[in-house]
Amino acid sequence: MTSRTTTPADPATAAYLLGLADDAMVYAQRLGEWLTNAPQLEEDMALANVSLDLLGQARALYPRVGELDGTGRGEDDFAMWRDERDWRNVHLVEQPRGDFADEMARLLWFSTTRLELFSAGASDPVLAGVMAKGVKELGYHVDHAAQWVVRLGDGTDESHRRMQAALDRVAPYVDELFTDDETVLAVPEADRGPLPSQLREHVVRRVDRVLHSAGLTRPEPGAWRAKDGRRGIHSRPMGSLLAEMQYLARSHPGATW
Amino acid sequence: MTTTTRTSPAELEAALRDVPDPEVPVLTVGDLGILRSVAADEATGRATVTVTPTYSGCPATEAIAAHLTYVARRSGWEVDVVTRLDPPWTTDWMSDAGRERLRRFGIAPPGPAAHRDGRSPVELHLTRRVVACPHCGSHDTEELSRFGSTACKALRRCLACREPFDEFKAI
């Protein structure tokens, strides 16, 4: 911001912001993998654009986390030099790129939830700025995902079958988006906006509206549900994601071009 | 040792506003509305330049900051380039001159930005907005892709002259 004041250490807010930043960073990496792999050239560009928007959110948040936790770490320290157990993203975003329909199901849940959270605003000035900016971009992401879900769900028998199967595969990872973990509960209510659990009703209603238009059914999650990403417990694909993402920075520290 | 004559604050601001956007070079950062303010202190020779990105992840942001710093130094000033996200950039800040230059360059200028508070209902139908072709002026155009070659553009084509063209997205 304009004034260079010393920010008092606030580890609770830092931990909360880290989760939001890591969700964006890891999902940006997964979305970037669609380049040259999407069903159309236009979709390569679309998903790369969505990825860039999320990368921008992470880049703005990481230095703020470094300021609030007192370590002074910058964006590369967070993105490139942390090991798996130090990442605080939800499991949904680290899952490997599946069918294109899987990506649209994931993008619909993720961007609808993040849009709902960002619309509420926050008291931290950096987070508030990221949110105000992000609302416009996330709204575009939600629209994009919703239009594909409707097109596929209300398309051919094959596209309908695959879109429904994608929703079923993504379902076990949705619940974690609405889980009140320790990091969010540690932040005073006035500073953080709504709890994840308080977002659920609105998000589900909005997703249901899309699924209804598409002739699709929202699956109820089964007994197994992903959890504990915010505590640094991750699923197997996270390791190879980090290996690829961090390879260059770790093999050639300080490399520039 | 060489000394550069320092320009006046007004001249500095004019020079900074004239820096071109690296991806759409017919537009200046002044036209785009991403240069938010220049606070120049004549006593110290330092200026604080506040910019806002078009999109959170816009890769041009760093090139723009470097170019602003270069132009300021050439004018005898030292600058701090500060990025501010809030209030978020809107295409409504684009100047009329900038819009006309975009059109002549072959990019349809943005329409009025839709108010989006994040809680409006999701649009589920493929809507047809009326966008004039920057080449022939026909309104008979269609959207090919909601995302274009950069974050700020969408891709359309003209059904009258058959030319594809970029549209600057209204946000």
Image (tube, rainbow, N blue to C red):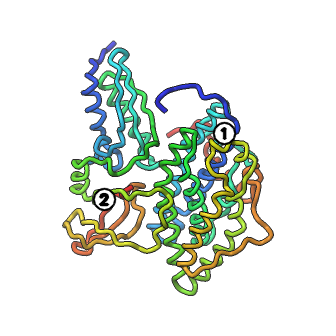
Residue placed under numbered mark 1 in the picture: A14
Label annotation for residue B111:
2
Q: Nearer the viewer, residue B66 or B36?
A: B36
Q: Is residue A185 left or right of residue B23?
A: right
Q: Is residue A24 above or below residue B64?
A: below
Say which residue appears at 53% left-offset and 56% top-offset. Answer: A51
Q: Are marks 2 and 1 in contact (CB under 8 Å)?
A: no
Q: Quadrant of residue A12?
A: top right
Chain of residue at mark 2: B
Say which residue appears at 44% left-offset and 74% top-offset. Answer: B125
* Farthest residue, direction bottom: A157
Label annotation for residue B13:
none
Say which residue appears at 57% left-offset and 66% top-offset. Answer: A108
Q: Quadrant of residue B81?
A: top left
Q: Amino acid at mark 2?
A: Gly
Q: Is residue A42 above or below residue B12?
A: below
Say which residue appears at 52% left-offset and 63% top-offset. Answer: A142
Q: Secondary structure at mark 2?
A: loop
Q: Amino acid at mark 1?
A: Ala
* Farthest residue, direction front: A190
